[in-house]
Image (spheres, coloured by chain):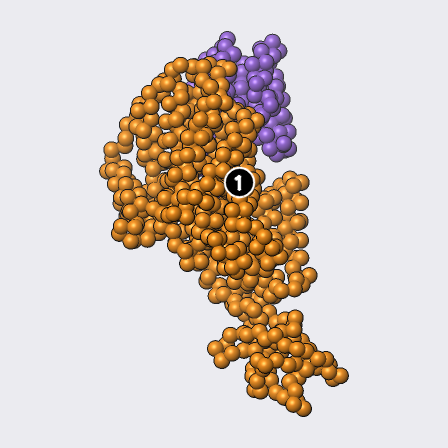
Amino acid sequence: MSEQIHILVIEDEPEVLDALVRDLEDFEELFPVEMVATAEEARTVIDDILDTGGRIGLILCDHILPGENGVELLVDLQEKPETKSTRKVLVTGQAGLDDTVKAVNEADLNHFIEKPWTEEHLHKVVVNQLTSYVIENEKSFLPYMQLLDSTRLSEEMHKRGNISDY
Amino acid sequence: MRLTKVQWIGLVLGCMGFILPLIFTFSGLSFAGHMALGIFLMAAVFWMFEPIPIYSTSMLIILLEVLLLSMQGPVFMDATLPVETLNKTNGQYEVLSQAVSDQQLYSVSSDGDVVPHKIDVRSMPNGKLQVQSPDLNEGMTIISNADHRLVNYKPNNYSDYLATLASPIIILFLGGFVLAEASVKYNLDRNLTRLLLRPFGSKPKFIVLGLMLVTAVLSAFMSNTATTAMMMTVILPIIARIETGDALKIGVALSIPFAANIGGIATPIGTPPNAVVIGALSQQGLNITFGQWMLYAVPIVVVMLAVAWGALMIIYPAKTKHLKLDLSGRFDLSVSAKILYFVFGFTVLAWVTESIHGINSSIIALVPVAVLTFFGVIDKEEIRNLPWEVLWLVAGGLALGIALDRTGLAQWMISSIDWQSLSNIWLLLVFAAVAVSMSNFLSNTVTATLLIPLAISLSTSGVAGSDFSLLITSVLIGVGASLAMVLPISTPPNAIAISTGMVETKDMAKAGVLIGIVGLVMVMIYAIFVWPLI
């Protein structure tokens, strides 16, 4: 199952990273969750996933990271064709207006989660973003119906007519 | 393309099936029959194991038939019958040994027809055969090679196989597809759903009944799958509001695919197996009108809906007392949408009143195609989005039917079974039971495609006895193929329902087996007592 859609979490504080990953447990059976602490590591992991034929469906990224910051990384990933369609979410308490504007305009940021988050809210954002990713990039929605937004997926299936009667 | 183990097995078996008749010779089967047998075996295996998509198998069938069986294909392109004139030597007819096969000698009549003659044979020391029969005359044109590929087979023009793609039933489906596509574009199906659900109040029992009726009506004119996908958007929010642990959740989630599967039976355009039946029958000169099909099918649809509703309500009783449906929304009132409403209404009306005005439903089907594109109600985007592969799938099935019929393969296949020992009722039961059980595992269309040629050859060969009705048997096969809903793989609507995670396979199987068995009984009752009266 190397063509799987991965979730990548980038966060340098171990406790916060743990909390994020714990809240993402539900998704793991279909979307493997990868965790890294820096932008540098993130690039290596992304390359590894792409090399084995996998894809990155969603990136949850902290802004303040050691070395290159989160927004710069997201802008860079937006410019690469392989990660252009990846849904990008900034999870932060400290991004200033300039960085936020840059993230929205240049990285096509899909969502902004302010720390501290609630599990319910995070869950909803992840479901929404992954649903959008699946709608844009997948041919068959059926494997994702149970975990993601089945109403939206049904709606899209109906509109596209991508399953016929046999 | 990555194949699973089962698909690999299917691929290998299918190819072996194709080669088998090229290696072994079966007695009583013409050369072309061998070719057709290879195509048939390969197609059947490919359709069952799906190493390639089922529509691709259909495309392959048409290609192979054109190549191997048509007048223009390389096999028959330059073929001419080897003939000689029958003459007496020493007062007896002598012919080359290969001119005789199975004690038969073939002559060519003045019209070019090949006529077999039963003869007495005596071997001669010179390797020739001395033949005797009162049929033989001096100067007769006989065929000097009885195993030649043109003996017992007149190849079709290749356009006969290609023409299946534009056969009347395909055009009828095209009309239905265009209407459905336009309805989705202008939200007609969703708005109709809201309108039709209003009278059903808030009691869960009646809401489920309403959902099933609306689903069935829509799926009678749209694809079962598209209807299911649309209805899912209606019921998923409802299900989310039902308390956890209430069996009603399962009942609601199953009501949609079941009603969609059953509703598809109601009209010729409801689901592809109907097209297979109608298309095959019209090749035999039996034309079923739109209204006539509905006369056969609608009563059984109504009964099966009631059965399915009752079964779901008993197996999955509701704890919730009231359910609120969100029925807000308005009809699109743009000019384009209004044209669609009018054309939709007109077309359906014209279809069901064929017996009054006499204009064929396939001709009427061209009205929505021409008018909706004329006014730009749908444009090339929507035309491209039509499920063309379904049309190919059905056309391939029809083309296979032609080949089975023309090459004598279908007759040859059924001749090995002693059908006389089966009474007509047993025969119907066998066909219905096989159709229902087979289509639980295979595509409904494929099930109908594989079974219909058997029914046709039973009828044309006359072995099935005088109370055998081809029409009734074929309709029974078509209806039976749509009554399979035990497994997630049985139909695409079932697959959608399971994928939501609201129901488990065992829930589906429990209700599906019940519906399958009752359906089998009902279809038998109709086939024996009701349909003969129509």
Q: Residue furthest bottom?
A: B90
Residue B32 shown left or right of residue B228 in the figure: right
Foreground residue, B294 or A16?
B294
Residue B312 screen position, x and y as percent: 47, 25
Image-quadrant location for residue B414: bottom right
If the image is split into quadrants, where does the N terminus of chain A sit? top right
Q: Residue furthest right?
A: B125
Q: Residue placed at 52% from the left, 12% from the top? A: A119
Q: Colour of chain A?
A: purple
Q: Colour of chain B?
A: orange
B356 is higher (above) or lower (below) than B242: below
Residue A147 shown left or right of residue B295 in the figure: right
B262 is higher (above) or lower (below) than A14: below
Q: Secondary structure at mark 1?
A: helix
Residue B353 screen position, x and y as percent: 29, 47
Q: Residue placed at 39% from the left, 54% from the top? A: B287
Q: Residue placed at 38% from the left, 47% from the top? A: B533
B135 is higher (above) or lower (below) than A83: below
Q: Chain of mark 1?
A: B
Foreground residue, A115 or A143?
A143
Residue B454 seen by the camera: yes
> Mark 1, residues whose alpha carbon is within 10 Å: few (<14), some, or many (≥20)?
many
Residue B220 screen position, x and y as percent: 38, 39
Q: Residue placed at 67% from the left, 40% from the top? A: B5
> Which residue position holds label 1?
B436
Q: How many marks?
A: 1
Residue A163 seen by the camera: no
Please, what is the three-letter code of the amino acid marked with disc 1? Answer: Val
Image-quadrant location for residue B34: bottom right
Residue A12 screen position, x and y as percent: 60, 14
